[in-house]
Image (cartoon, helix red, strand yellow):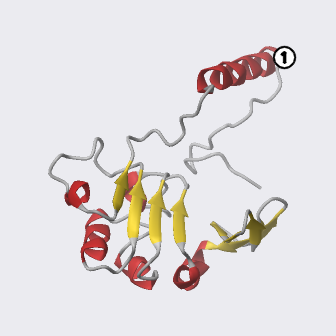
Amino acid sequence: MLTRAGAHVRSVGRRGRMDPELGWVAPVSELGSLLPAADFVILVLPLTSQTHLLIGPDELARMRHDAWLINLGRGTLVDDAALVSALLRGEIGGAALDVFADEPLPAGSPLWALPNVIISPHMSGDFQGWEGALADLFLRQLRLYRSGKPLANIVDKRLGYIPGS
């Protein structure tokens, strides 16, 4: 477990491993056992066949009644119907959602009316100066390409994401 700014952070990945920045990363098979202790469950992972509907009725039922689900990854990481049901029944404290299965979120979605839901316009990655950072990344990649060196941040198309360590 990593402690930063007074928060105890546990990470989950495809497989268990030690990470130099995160400490112990638990395997996804342990997600269910970690959920009852979480104040916030934050999803920042890619959509793959393994992560599709990662959070469904069983996972939501394991969360504390005051815990919040925050999805910044992909909309279909979460079973929307199960989430709405859990929110309406008070099974979880709330949800902060930047992504949805259907985007833009349809006007008739019950998520709009729930007082314990925060909806952002799929802009969680925006930050002041993003244009310059994007140009810098492009120029760095162009230099690598022109010198015949491997590019950074290559997405493995079989996996659907940039493989980590």
User: How many marks are shown on the rendered structure?
Assistant: 1
Which residue is more in the foreground, 11 or 154? 11
Location of residue 83 by image quarter: bottom left
Q: Position of residue 31 (x, y in %)?
A: 56, 77
Horizontally, residue 91 falls left or right of residue 135, namely left
Location of residue 55 by image quarter: bottom left
Instruction: Assign a secondary structure to mark 1.
Output: loop
Amino acid type, mark 1:
Ser
**Residue labelled with disc 1:** 147
Which residue is more in the foreground, 57 or 118? 118
Callout 1 crowding tier (Cα within 10 Å): few <14, some 14–19, many ≥20:
few
Which residue shows up at 81% across the image and 59% down it? 21
- Rendered view: 42 above or below 85: above
- Rendered view: 80 above or below 88: above
Q: Position of residue 4 (x, y in %)?
A: 75, 63
Q: Position of residue 15 (x, y in %)?
A: 68, 69
Quadrant where the N terminus sits is: bottom right
- Rendered view: 118 above or below 4: above
Which residue shows up at 26% across the image and 46% down it? 105
Which residue shows up at 79% across the image and 14% down it? 146
Horizontally, residue 156 falls left or right of residue 96, namely right
Horizontally, residue 3 falls left or right of residue 111, namely right
